[in-house]
Amino acid sequence: MRCVVANWKMNLSFEEARTFCEDFLGHVSLGAGTEAGIAPPYTMLHLVSDLVRPKGLHVFGQNGHAEPKGAFTGEVSMPQLRDAGCSGVLLGHSERRQLFGETDAALIKKVKAAWQWDLLPLLCIGETLEQRDAGQTLDVLGQQLAILGETGPGPLWVAYEPVWAIGTGRRAEAPQVAEAHAFIRATLNRYFAGTEYQVPILYGGSVTPETFTELLGIPEVAGGLVGGASLDPAKFAALVKQAG
Ligand code: PGA
């Protein structure tokens, strides 16, 4: 299975989102074995979901709170994401970890809550440049995946996103991606031993149509989580076609 997910972050207006979806759907149809999804800002979830879910695409929230409801001003819960048409939720994106203080302890609760409300978590992990330079990459990935020892196994996608490659135009080199993905697979095999779950491992960080084919040729790279290039419907359609 190949997976391509657009992470729009805090971009696009309502009308731009509508035009994007119409344009994108005009360019692409999903082949068997390819899964695609879009993670729009909350205000466009209903719109995007109405347009793309009938065509077989996923819609992801960009974050979700672990509690189902309550006094949490500014937050959106998992049942509310479902209500808005989501089938999944991004969790642990490095921007959430770095800018909004998201912790592994919070992520344990969020993954469990996503499963409770039948949402597919797309768990993002990755090291900073400092950590890579200090030779800590695999330790960091191992720590971030250790939350799975607390949640137990369940339906899951993982995205390896080196923080230094996000939005920088500086994609990780093939051997770096290969090493990280092999490590993530071996770690997942431990946490998911004896279960039926197949966890695809996506790469994220400055993915473009120019570099995606090479990335897809790396063992254990099942697809991409795409920021900048996913804001252009023709580029996102090209990425989905390359995955097909
Ligand atoms: P980028 O973002 O493709 O713009 O590097 C990827 C992401 O943050 O998921």
Image (tube, rainbow, N blue to C red):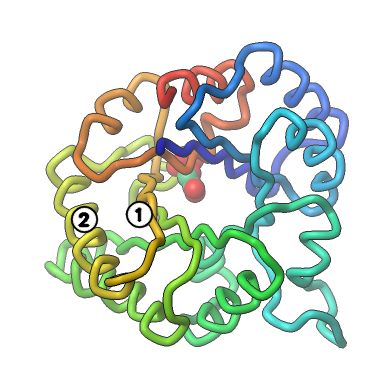
- For disc 2, the marked residue is 180
Mark 1, secondary structure of its residue: strand
* Residue 18 picture location, percent across and down: 83, 28
User: Which residue shows up at 40% across the image and 80% down it?
Assistant: 147
Of label 2 and label 1, which has the lower sequence position? 1
Q: Nearer the viewer, residue 140 or 122?
A: 122
Q: Nearer the viewer, residue 27 or 133?
A: 27
Answer with left or right where residue 182 lies relative to residue 144. left
**Picture quarter with the C terminus:** top left
**Picture quarter with the N terminus:** top left
Q: Quick check: marks 2 and 1 in contact, CB under 8 Å?
A: yes
* Residue 151 picture location, percent across and down: 47, 82
User: Quadrant of the rendered structure where residue 73 is?
Assistant: bottom right
Q: Which mark is residue 160?
A: 1
* As drawn, 50 above or below 195: above
Q: CA distance from mark 2 to mark 1?
A: 8 Å
Q: Nearer the viewer, residue 127 or 77?
A: 77
Disc 1 residue type? Tyr
Disc 2 residue type? Ala
